[in-house]
Amino acid sequence: MTLPSSLLAEPEPFDDLPPKEHPVPLATTLSPVRTVPTLAEAALRVRPTTLAVERILPVLPALVGLVPDGLRRGSSLGVSGPGARSLAMALMAGTTSAGSWAAVVGDPDLGLVAAGEAGVALERLAIVTTPEPSAWGDVVGALVGSLDLVVVAPQHRVGAATVRRLMARVRERGSVLIRVGDGPWPDRFDLTLTVVDGSWEGHGSGHGRLLLRRAEVLASGRRAASRERRVAMMLPSPDGSPASSEQTGDG
Amino acid sequence: MTEPARTLVVRCPDWPLTALGVAPSDPAMVLASGRVVAASTAARSGGVLEGQRRRLAQSMCPEAAVLERDEAVEARGFEPVVAALSDITPWVELQRPGTCAFAVRGPVRLFGGEESLVDSTAVTVQEALDDTLGVGAHPGCRIGVADGPFAAGLAARSVDGRAVLVPAGATPGFLIPFPVSVLERPDLVDVLVRLGLTTLGALAALPVADVVGRFGSEGLDAQRLARGLDGRPLQLAGHPPDLAVGIEMDPPVERIDQVAFAARSLAGSLHDGLACRGLACRRVVVEAETGHGERLVRRWRDEGAIGATALADRVRWQLEGWLNGPPGVRPTSGLVRLDLVPEELVHAGSHQPGFWGGATAADEWALRALNRVAAMLGPGSVRVPEWRGGRDPAEQMTLVPVPEGPVAGSVDGLIPVVPHPPDSPPWPGVVPAPSPAAVHAAPAAVEVLDAADRTVIVDGRGVVSAEPVRLCQGGGAGVGVVSWAGPWPVDERWWDPSRHRRRACMQVVFDDGLARLLVLEEGRWWVAATYD
């Protein structure tokens, strides 16, 4: 028995168009030829959909003014200026407290107490010693495959080929690479955060103590982030966590 | 119901210490994840107990050397003992480094009675220990004989006398006075103790149906052990044909790191093969074949049903023991084949990963990646933070090496990190929050100068000699001071001349936009931390 080709073709999922005129009786359409799809087709139909919200990593409420949609998976960030470490910790805080892992490569000075105060989930933070420049690419490459957030502070000049390979892996695996520091980087970042102005408050000459730093952070980047934003925030606030102050306007 | 087999357990007390080369007379303790796992006799007489935290143990016995646990060394050091015991019976099972067991039934006929079997076992182990470690460098061994490995293990732990023989059939009575904590199931034991069931006897006396109704299969296992029966009944009916896994190695492998890599994947595939049939195994046979046709066989036992990572560790230890062992043990050529054969299959129990909380797949991936990086860069290169407490930002947190594989007993995370414990007592004089974002591992020596270019000093009353104006490092022009606070004198451990620290801290904001934490100690200024 041969069937018309219109019946052999699979309808689109959720196809709610009215059925066409059936030239054959209903019983014929229930033949095994019609009802057994291949395994690949079945897998295609039940494949989980990726929501847009799953392609971003969350950030703290204080940073929503800087990165309104959160950190896009598969992107790179450059964080620089005086206070870059505090800003990097603030970025790590939102992501790790939501269950992601973060690794810091090549920054033995990172203040762990400050990280804890900023809100970083320390049980999901790993500190990797500075690797040899020749092994740097392999180490960071191994981490971006499995951890959501990898913070690097290379002390050497990173080659353009290494960064290209690394970014391909970051995009493929959906991690976020954050580079802390001011040195040269052979690639453009998707988003650049620069602490442009910071002033400490809470003490004078011989009295008081450091309470908070009012800082202004400049965000610029590619694509959706190409419009420059300038956000004033407390980095850190008196309890050590980053907090937003009033927004000074879009640049 | 099968009767538990008569078992002999040989236990070398404080093996973690002995393996690291500590004689029983030296005060020393071995720590793992910040807790004492073994202490020498000298340290124990000072009040050090197993399970104590580092700080408490050190305050009990300050002169004791503190060593980190190294299970690979323990396993390697124990291999000659197991090899010597193979002369008595080939069916020696390793429970953990320092403890092994074998069934009495076969060798007891050869030696004519359990007493003489125990005697010759003791002599064999003693000679093997004397040969490898030297006379007097080890506390000898303890031997226990009872029905079933659990009771025999407890008999070998009794402190009085060197050998304890529990007569056949007397095992349930022998077990009655032991506390439930010997079951090594911390969650269950916690509940049992709160219900007033503090001894194995009390648990054994409960009706089986009630125990199963309240505690499920885990409770049943525990009660079977408490009654002197085998833990989980063996899964005898309908074995799937072949669950053993093996790997051929061509060319022959001689280096331990290469074999360890193969062992890890092999352990994973054995575990997966068992898990997808809902099984677990209580005993694994590690078999290796060398290029010269030698066949090395060793059995490892774990009552708690061996997990993939734990199994991989045991296989690696065993291979290290063979490949790095003394000439009598070491194979004469490289390994060409490695097999893992599961024995004593049991139902895997009702463990199911949680939907919320608990270890997630992301945690496992992350830990795997971190272990891979640690393998690339060498041990201790990947570390995780742990709370220690202290006044300096540098003292409050420390970094500990990332554990290999999930840590037994940690439910929430894979890493036994202690962030700030909420009930920790305060540290008067601590540098207040917000803490500096950069704590310098190697503080830089600097000059702090006043308006007349003299070095600023702090006197005994905690008063600065003049207002600081400039900070110079290495003869440069330096940065100017915008504002400053302090100094705060800190005088720590004035009662202990060797660890006495007296210093003064200042928070200073400079005109480069950064604030720094300056420390004056023994007449020199240091940049301890930067508020980056």
Image (cartoon, grey):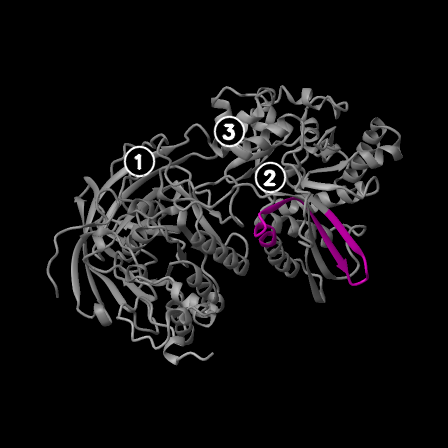
Q: At label 3, which amino acid type do we have?
A: Gly
Q: Which badge, 2 or 1, comes first in the chain's sequence?
A: 2
- Chain of the residue displaying label 2: B
Q: Which badge, 1 or 3, comes first in the chain's sequence?
A: 3
Q: Residue furthest left?
A: A249
Q: Which residue is mark 1?
A: B489
Q: At label 2, which amino acid type do we have?
A: Gly
Residue B151 percent location from the top left of the image: 68, 28
Q: Residue at x 50, y 34 (%)?
A: B54
- Chain of the residue displaying label 1: B
Q: Residues within 10 Å of mark 1 (few under 14, many from 20)?
A: many
Residue B304, label in figure: 2
Q: Is residue B120 left or right of residue B220?
A: right
Asked whether B484 or B463 is in front, the reply is B484
- The answer to whether mark 2 and mark 1 are in CB contact below 8 A is no
Q: Secondary structure at mark 1?
A: strand
Q: Which badge, 3 or 2, comes first in the chain's sequence?
A: 3
Q: Which residue is mark 3?
A: B213
Q: Which mark is in front, 1 or 3?
A: 3
Question: What's drawn in magenta, residue-wise?
Answer: B271-298
- Is residue B182 placed above or below A171 in the rendered structure? above
- Is residue B365 placed above or below B505 in the rendered structure? below
How far apart are the two marked residues, 3 and 2, measured between alpha carbons?
Answer: 21 Å
Q: Is residue B97 left or right of residue B440?
A: right
